[in-house]
Amino acid sequence: MIEAEQGGLYRSDDGGVHWQRVNDDGRLSQRAWYFSTILADPRDVNTVYAENTGLFRSTDGGKSFELLPARHGDHHGLWIDPTNPDRIIEASDGGASISFDRGRSWSPQNNQPTAQFYHVSVDGRFPYYVYGAQQDSGSVAVASMDDEGAIVSRDWYDVAGGEAGFVIADPRDANIVYGTNENLITRFDKKTKQARVISVWPVDASGHAAKDLAHRFNWTSPLSISPFAPDTLYYGMERLYRTTDDGNSWTAISPDLTRNDKSREQASGGPITKDITSVEYYDTIFAIAESPLTKGMIWVGTDDGLIHLTRDGGVGWSNVTPHDMPPWSTISMIEPSRYDTNTAYVAVDRHKLDDIKPYAYKTSDGGRSWTRIDAGLLEGSFVHAVREDAVRRELLYAATETGVFVSFDAGAHWQSLQLGLPRSPVHDLVVKGDDLVIATHGRSFWILDDVSPLREAVAAAAAGGAYLYSPATGYRLHYPDQVDARPPSGQNPPAGVLIDYYLPRAPTGPVALDILDGSGGVVRHLSSEKSGEAEQPPEWPDQVHPAKTLPAEQGMNRFVWDLRYNDPVQIPDAFYEGLPPRGPLVMPGRYTLKLSYGGKTQDAPLIIKADPRDGAALAGLEQKFVLSMQVYHDQDALHRAVNDIRGVKSGIAATLQAAGARDDRALASEGDALVQQASSIEGVLMQVNIKGSEANLNFPGMLNEQIYAFAGLLDDADTAPNAQETETYADFHTRLATQLAAWSALKSAKLPAFCSHARQGGGQPDPALCAP
């Protein structure tokens, strides 16, 4: 592909000695630079592929091309299997796709979490949604959690803006979302699915050099909502604009805040083919941030290295650019402190100037002086954003080209916070409550669930030993027992409360954790020692089994408590339709964690709240909880009775076996009768023939199976039990009480006599059955 006045596709049949133009189809060369790629078939000399906005193929030596139905658009990479040209892999702005039939059909791209986000924001819903603009795939809102256990297509939708820029939900109504893309600003209404244009300057500037335009704007033009007035928005071009009526009208509140160097506003691309998309526009505002503490105190940063500040809503402006900051830097992001009016943090990016060193600055006096705060950030980790923690002032997070970093001393020192995050550029991040939400440029959105341990890192280090961290507030949610997490899906946050603790060394004995309610009663006891209880063999691959054993490794440990009481006593080898019987969900309230390790204990408070989306009265939930606890205690009593019956039957068998040499037929008859009577009660208490999760379709469920299913029904919603549920429980309880009484009476009436008979003549009955 030759870029020239008489350019187009040229072909040589003699190794490059002579060339002839075979095609001047503009589709193949309309975008130059990394768009124009030609690749020849390794087997057929007349088959050639051309990549540009579309993917094209010629089978007549380049004379004509057909458009292939490749996924997405803007194609930049192609691989043809040299041994089998039918197999092709192509890469576009939407991801990678594979074809096994020379491009007639392609594999999907939605199985690859490769979105390139420019910025990130969150809203105030529960669960909160994450917003951003993704390269060549538009803007998106996606839930941070799905009630069915995995974040899937139903949890995301298109919103305002476009492939670049900022996307921000209206704090008054998350159905309203503002977004930018170049000089476009739209206001999206989820109810109507319409995106209304509210641009300051609604003119298509494509193909025009910045110097020739009435306004200059950035590819990722910044937009900000005032923390004091949700109908007030700020937007940056070469000047700062403000609207106080949701974008119906705009007013400039600043002069040109850039250098306005015309030498840097020329046409991009060329000299033959220009490529002016505004990506290369310069002398524009790049960052806007109003102080969350002082109304009208607005910081503005530009892509040509200037920082300005107004304290009066734009009436007067001061140039507060750091004196030692290299010129022409991009002010990538400004973070005004939520703790102090005069404190702000600035992320500076110079990679376009071939300087990949990290630059970050802090001011504590409103921009009069600045301090570099990038010690510990690695070469190549140029900084895109610095954010303050929402709870601990000295705790900072940095989004860099190589990942996420954390500082525990207000930026004096930094260290990696990569953990399990894939290595990828991180362009932005935001602290949402106890979560850290990041926008990667190539690996989509990620959320670090519960940064509470980071807030106590200094205290934990000072403690010098085992340390139990104070957990974040938990929410009483109904987590699913089965989750289809197959791609394409996002990972849900852990299903429960995250409990973090540090152990200075691997323990030699068990580590225990007790969870106490407000009265000091033990709700849940957990240990690092496995219980030894037999588990039901697995049948369902999507079934989720909550952890029951504490991790006990040297260093940091994290356990997810599913907010349930201790399990009832289990019946070995019993089968159920779902997870084995378990304790009810705890009520909202205050709890205490008690960690026992090495002969010492540590306490930490825990608050559990009701689901914020649930409008049910707490009194109704309390009634449901009381009923669930009654069912729970009945399950426990039933299971203990069945285990007791089986223990007695086993003891009788052992006793008869020991007495076999005596040939005591009367004892055998007595024992067999007792076993038969015990089995009769056992058969009413549970279905003994069930050996699979759906075997109840063949063998009818008895009390155990019916109460198990009923307990699951009570878990459906946070509402008061209805009359049918109350009546059903009363029936179950009466039937259970009858069988428990029958079993107690049988033991009292028959077991002592059997044991006495077994001892006659020097017999030795089973000691577990016939205690002295």
Image: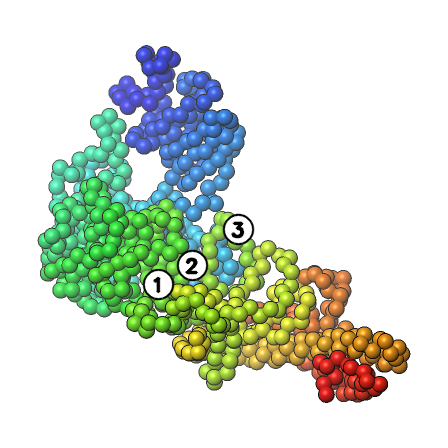
Q: Quadrant of the C terminus?
A: bottom right
Q: Where residue 438 sits in the image (x, y, percent)?
A: 35, 55
In the image, 279 versus 666, the foreground residue is 666
| Residue at image location 10% in from the left, 53% down from the top | 323
Q: In this rendering, does residue 89 appear at all?
A: yes
Q: Quadrant of residue 761?
A: bottom right
Judge depth for marks 3 and 1 and give the one in front.
3
Mark 2 in CB contact with mark 3 (< 8 angstroms): no
Check disc 2: other Cα within 10 Å, few if <14, some if 14-19, many if 20+. Answer: many
In the image, 417 versus 152, the foreground residue is 417
476 with respect to 466 (left or right): right
491 with respect to 240 (left or right): right
Q: Quadrant of residue 502?
A: bottom left
The circle on residue 144 is 2
Q: Amino acid at mark 2?
A: Ser
497 over 250 or under it: above or below: below
The circle on residue 511 is none
Check disc 3: other Cα within 10 Å, few if <14, some if 14-19, many if 20+. Answer: few
**Of callouts 2 and 1, the N-terminal one:** 2
Q: Where residue 243 sits in the image (x, y, percent)?
A: 24, 56
Q: In this rendering, does residue 243 appear at all?
A: no
Residue identified by numbered label 1: 432
In three-dimensional space, the C-alpha distance between marks 2 and 1, rounded to whole angstroms, equals 11 Å
507 over 287 or under it: above or below: below
Q: Quadrant of residue 300?
A: bottom left
Mark 2 in CB contact with mark 1 (< 8 angstroms): yes
In three-dimensional space, the C-alpha distance between marks 3 and 1, rounded to whole angstroms, equals 27 Å
Residue identified by numbered label 3: 486
Q: Where residue 339 sits in the image (x, y, percent)?
A: 23, 68
Q: Amino acid at mark 3?
A: Arg
**Of callouts 2 and 3, the N-terminal one:** 2
